[in-house]
Amino acid sequence: MSALIDLEDIWLCYGGRPVLSGLTLSVPEGEILALLGPSGCGKSSVLRLILGLTAPDRGVIRLRGETVSEHGRIICLPEERGLAVVFQDLALWPHLTVSGNLNFVLGSKKLPREEKDLRITNALRHVGLAGMEHRYPTALSGGERQRVAIARALVLDPDAILLDEPASNLDVILKRDLLRMFRQILKEREGTALYVTHDPREAASLGDHIAIMEKGQIVQVGELRQLRALPANDFVRALVEDI
Amino acid sequence: MQRILVVVLLGLLASGLLSCSRGGAQEVVVYTSVDQVFSEPIFRAFERETGIAVRAVFDTEETKSTGVLNRLIAEARSPRTDVFWSGDPVRPFVLINHGLVEAYISPSATAIPPSFKAADGTWTGFAARARVLLVNKHRVPSQDTPRSIEDLANPRWKGQAAMANPLFGTTTMHVAALFATWGEARAGRFLEQVKANNVRIASSNGEVKRLVIAGESAFGLLDSDDATDALNAGVAVEVVYPDQDTLGTLVMPTAVVLIRGGPHPQNGRKLIDYLLSPDVEARMAGTAGHMPLRSTVPTPAHVRPVSALRMMPADYSRVTSEIERIQPWLRNWVGL
Amino acid sequence: MAPELGRSVRTSLKRLEEPLALYSVGVVLCLVALVPFLFLVGELVVGGPKAMSQSLAIVTSFRLQRLFLDSFGLALAVTVLSLLVGVPMGVLLGKTDVAGRSLALLLYAFPIFVPPFLLALGWFYLLGHQGFVGNERTAAVLFSPFGAVAVLSLNFAPIVTMFVAIGLQGIDQTLEEAARLVAPPWRVVTHILLPLIWPAVATAALVVFALAFSELAVPMFLRVPNYPAAILARLSGMQYDPGEAFALVLPLLGLSLILLLIERRFLGERSFEVFGLHSIEAWTMPLKSWKPLMSPVCWFLALFSITPLMALAVRASDGGFPAVFQWIGSSPGYSLLFGSISATVIVMIGLVAGRAVARKTRGSRYCDAIAVLAFVAPASVLGVGLIAVWSHPATQFVYGSMVIVILGLIARYGVIGIRTLAATIAQSSPHLEESAAAFGAGFFRRMTQILLPMHWRGVVAAWLLALVFCLRDLDTVILFYPPGMETLTIRIFTLEANGPEAVVAALALLHILLTVGALGAGAALLLRGRPR
């Protein structure tokens, strides 16, 4: 399967401190790849690089085979990459209603109003928030806000969705429900997703493949059973053995 | 409610716009260092009589801004004004020296004595003021009333006198006139004595007036219009025209010049003609205590006529040169 | 081919939105603030090596160094006193349950609306030798460096108070609540809240120091030697020398750069944090047994600070009000017109540059530095520079119109917009903008549909603050206002020279009412905003 997102030999430093050291990663098209690693290993930085919010010091990033960032340059701006994101803090715009948040996202596409409304309605129904269009994010529970963030990502029908630990603040039951819903939605649309997490169980439940990251590098990529059977090192073994 | 408040704010802006409506096409621009309270009514009268709108720039007290004179100089490349009405006769010379003045002999100036105007029409003086002493009668017994500017240096009055900063305004002219008349040595010595006598250096003549009225100072050196204002306020003060037996009192006519390259030269001439009219001189005498230079214009009772005054000899052109020459010395004296 | 080309052009233009916006703001700031100074450098250079060395000799002379240190000492004393009074007042009036604190805050803030000289005049009517409550001793105290420090501190301390009060409102509730669980209120304030808003306090200190150092009229009136007077002596005396005046400004600009560097070095990442205008219900700290003492103290200070205004009112009541309309002309209209337009442009610049500063975009620090330098430099020097730049036949459409006034006010107070909005925007997560960018929104769309609506209350507050400064301005506008278009402050000061004192006092009160009226409408708009 061809890769939708390619990161090749990526190096990144923040304030003199190395964050990524020669990272190479491919996200196959139509797959959910879970990027698993401990806090501080550079997972969120990978997300920001793919989105075009940060440029790699060295290395090349490709989307759909085209180079979008390389060697200190952002060639393709974030708004041009056709991606969707769910940040850890969700970044819901507090001054817009639920439908306003989704409508804003659709503003970049030249669609008739009826189609926009239809997409919004469908997206909210998909995440179980039908009828919540006119509520503000501050009036929603944590779980409901998560769903709005996901609906906002889906409504655009992006080439890929990037998620940065979106379930980290949820309780066990909510997290389980969210992950189940999300997997179902992604599978239905046969979409590509990169799911960043520090929780091995989350990674296992959602990802078709798991990429394990440690100290700014990808240590191993594979299905769960492969990682269990042939862990590349003790770190991988420790991560996957309790799942 | 938010909409109402936004409308209110926009209304404030709109009211600003509306209240700033300009007059008709006929206008004249004048910069003046004559106090606004005296000059503005005269401009309004000119507007009523001629239908020409007057756009004026007034001066603040000397230490509040760079002054209209220097604004004129700064704007030399593209003059914005037609007329400059100066509160003293030396500022016009600064403009003349900068080549900013166009000669104009006004028909209204015929009766003004030659010593108060330029023969070539570059400047014309009228409605003069004098440099006087304002004395607080509560603080100074009548027999001790100071009669000379040299009393500023008299140890009898140590710490009790006031004068405006000699770097600015008419005090500059007065000090320069002393340098021109007495010579550098004597004038310099006098000022050092004034300093040693702890004379209060106020920021303006207006402040000197305030200090004397308030009794903060026993007496002060200022302009006669400030003194007239104090008299009109009904406070117990006396106005002394100093050195009537010796040096004489410095007399400073206000002066008008036509600015070269101004936007409305014709209207500028009309305004000058109006300002130099006997009627305006009479009005300046009545409201501002200025001394008419024409013998045909009556002097109010509370104003000393020029003819009854021993005037300090002053070549205004030389005084102007002296002002420029002594600036560095004065700055040092003042501590700036 | 054509659609491809069109799409390519649109994409290229979209990419340029953000850099173009910041460069445009930078160009405007350079034009209004930096270029005038460069022209003055030219004046200095044109004078030749002899004039330059003469200027250098004067600047480095003992006399002027002494004067510089005196002014520095005065400004430092004013800043320290303003902080000592302003910070506690900010906490008391912004955070505690002092009785009637909103009204007390409004009264206490009144001096900000008034040019400092008018307050000094009010104190003179009160404490002068023959003042309402004055005698020789009070006059001696007033006309002294102590008097100058006191008068200026009373004028500027409310600026610190406003920054502190607003800063406290913007603190994340969870930080406060976490502290309240384990510490008494006074420790929460001193160990958590005040350190959190330290950057806002530092900005307030910078503003107060700049205002105090460049203040000319009050020290001269109170007979305290000051460095700006030396600069003015080169511009308002009979020997007009803008080149030498600029040479005297150089040490001041150097000092400003040092202050900026100190601010950046020690505040670093925190330069603009914790100074938002969140509308959430903030915790009011109960004073409990301290309330009977603190409430009267606050009210005493609030009433004390408006005492000189009351003295002006008494003076105005002596026939001033009936005559005021004879003298007022169109000046209130011009004040509002110039102030409103300038405040709007200042806020627009502040949004772009302030956002860049908050997000640490490359080039933003230069915009901030230029704005700070223009604020610190004496207005007379900036003004003379602006005249030198714009007073040409080819640029009369600017110089001969109100545009020159707008440019002058932008140059002088641009820093208010930039700093206020930088602090406001820094309060929100950058993810809000980044997600909008990831979802395809270009820069202008993010600004107008995300940033502006989210921070509208901060934007309105910045506009009001800029309006206050523009309305009270004298030193800038007086230098080049178009003939016949004087503002109310200009009219007050031109009439002050021999004008009827009662009328001058009445005009001053009218100016305050004008400012309060505009602010009141704006503040009501803010208070009506719904929490998000």
Image (cartoon, grey):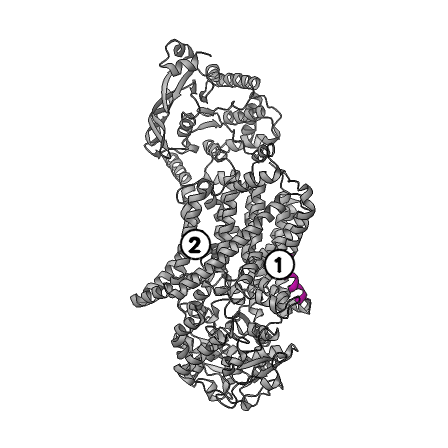
Tag 1: amino acid: Ile
Disc nearer the start of the sequence (2/1): 2
Image height check: is A146 above or below B295?
A: above
Q: Which residue is drawn at the image coordinates 64% and 47% (left, top)?
A: C524
Q: Which mark is residue C512?
A: 1
The span from disc 2 to disc 1 (Cα, nearest Å) is 28 Å
Identify the element where label 1 is drawn: helix
Residue that label 2 marks: C373
Local SS, label 2:
helix
Chain identity of mark 2: C
- The answer, for residue C464, to whether it is visible in the render is no
Q: Position of residue C19 (x, y in %)?
A: 40, 43
The majority secondary structure of the magenta stretch comes to helix
- Sort mark 2 into few (<14), some (14-19) or many (20+) by Cα contacts within 10 Å: many
Residue A17: x and y, percent? 36, 31
> Is A238 placed above or below C390 here?
above
Which chain is mark 1 on?
A: C
Quarter that holds the C terminus of chain C: top right
Q: Give the residues in magenta.
A: C304-317
Q: Nearer the viewer, residue B312 or C142?
A: C142
Taking the magenta stretch, the answer to whether it contains residue B79 is no
